[in-house]
Structures are given as structure tokens and as C-alpha cells.
Amino acid sequence: MFILWSGGKDSYLSFKKATSRGLEVTHAISYVDRRSGRLIGCYLRESLVREQVKSLGLDFVPVYGSKRRGDFIKNLRSTLLKLRSLAGVFGDIHQKEHRALLERVCGEIGVRAVFPLWHVDERVVIREALTVSEPLVVCRRVRKVPPRFLGRVLDNELLSYLDSVGLSLSGEGGEYQTFVATCEEFKLKLNFGRRFRRSYYECIDLEVG
């Protein structure tokens, strides 16, 4: 069984929920930009996420592609055919279109799609995620999330801010992305690098220390 892996709180919590139900997750699949060697969305280094996945005892499976070419879904399908898993775990909470897309891809090749967080209240997701991990905010949407939160552990100050301005507490609307360096299974020592911009997002560069 595989999990679609971002390195953040939602994928980690989904992993915990799936394994607590007796599901055996063996592979972590991540979308990686072929040119930069970084995960799409959160712009984390592939090498960093490999180390994280290794610490969980999973095999890392990158799906390389290009946002410009729009070939990630096609390449995901090819990867799943080679992997021959019977089921996959996904961390979506409310994004109906993304879930429908994943279910279509999985359904075409006979893979069961499991969504442990689907329609769980965001406050519950956050509470459970913070119980089992300490997610770092590694990417913020410029003009939506203030720069002071970047590089910090997800905390009540950020959650209160998001709530006060009517944004998604879990970041499901792209408000922010996280990386789990500390959790029940491991604690990674990190080096914090420069801040950089990608389109509407400001990110912080991380490497394993």
C-alpha cells in the first residue's frame, strides 16, 4: 500500500490513521519537479523528504514531472502501474475535485483510494496533528499569511490569525504548507537556509543537519 506524500501534517496524520486501522503502508509517493528537484506545492528538497520517509521505514517513490507540461497525473498513473499496489492513502480533507481526480486515476487501474481525513472538521484535524507531531510552517501564501509565521512550528497564534480572517485552519486552500521533522517515530535535525519566492508563495529552504 502507498501513501501520496507531501511531507506535511496531513499526509503524516493520514499515515498514522491508516496504520492504526491495520493498513500496511510501504511506499511514499511524492510529486517532484524534474528541473528543480523539489516537491511541487511546498518546494521542499527531494533529499529532505527522502530522509523523512526513510525515518518512517517507508520506500520513497518520486513521480517526476513538470507543472508547465502538466504531466504529473499521467506519470502518477504509470508509477502506480509499476508499483502494483492494491490501495493508496490520500490526505485530502475537502477538495472535491482533487479527490475525484485521484479516484478516477486509481479506479482505472484497480487501486482502492483511502481518504482518512475526508470531511473531518479542520479543528479536529489540527488538534490530532499537533498531538502526534510538531509541523513546521515551510511555505506561506503571500498577502494571506504574515511572514512572521514562516519557519515556525504551527501554533495557536497562526491558527487564531487564520480563524480571524476566515481562512482555512488546515491550509486546505493553499494558505500554508508544513513539514513534519518531529513526530512520534523520529526527530530530524534541520539546517534552516534562505527564504525564497515562488509565484504567490514564500518558502524557507531546509536541509537535514
Image (tube, rainbow, N blue to C red):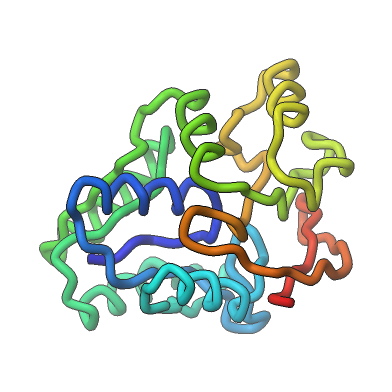
Residue at image location 41% in from the left, 43% down from the top = 92
Residue at image location 81% in from the left, 54% down from the top = 202
Q: Is residue 137 left or right of residue 14?
A: right
Residue at image location 60% in from the left, 56% down from the top = 182
Residue 2 position within the rendered picture, expressed as x and y whole percent measured from the top left: 29, 66
Q: In which quadrant of the rendered image does the N terminus lie? A: bottom left
How many numbered badges does the structure rendering display?
0
Q: In which quadrant of the rendered image does the C terminus lie? A: bottom right
- State whether residue 158 is above or below residue 188: above
Residue 159 position within the rendered picture, expressed as x and y whole percent measured from the top left: 69, 27
- State whether residue 175 is above or below residue 109: above
- State whether residue 178 is above or below residue 105: above
Residue 54 position within the rendered picture, expressed as x and y whole percent measured from the top left: 46, 76
Q: Is residue 94 left or right of residue 88?
A: right
Q: Nearer the viewer, residue 117 or 182?
A: 182
- State whether residue 2 is above or below residue 201: below
Res 58 → quadrant: bottom left
Q: Is residue 193 left or right of residue 25?
A: right
Residue at image location 78% in from the left, 58% down from the top = 203
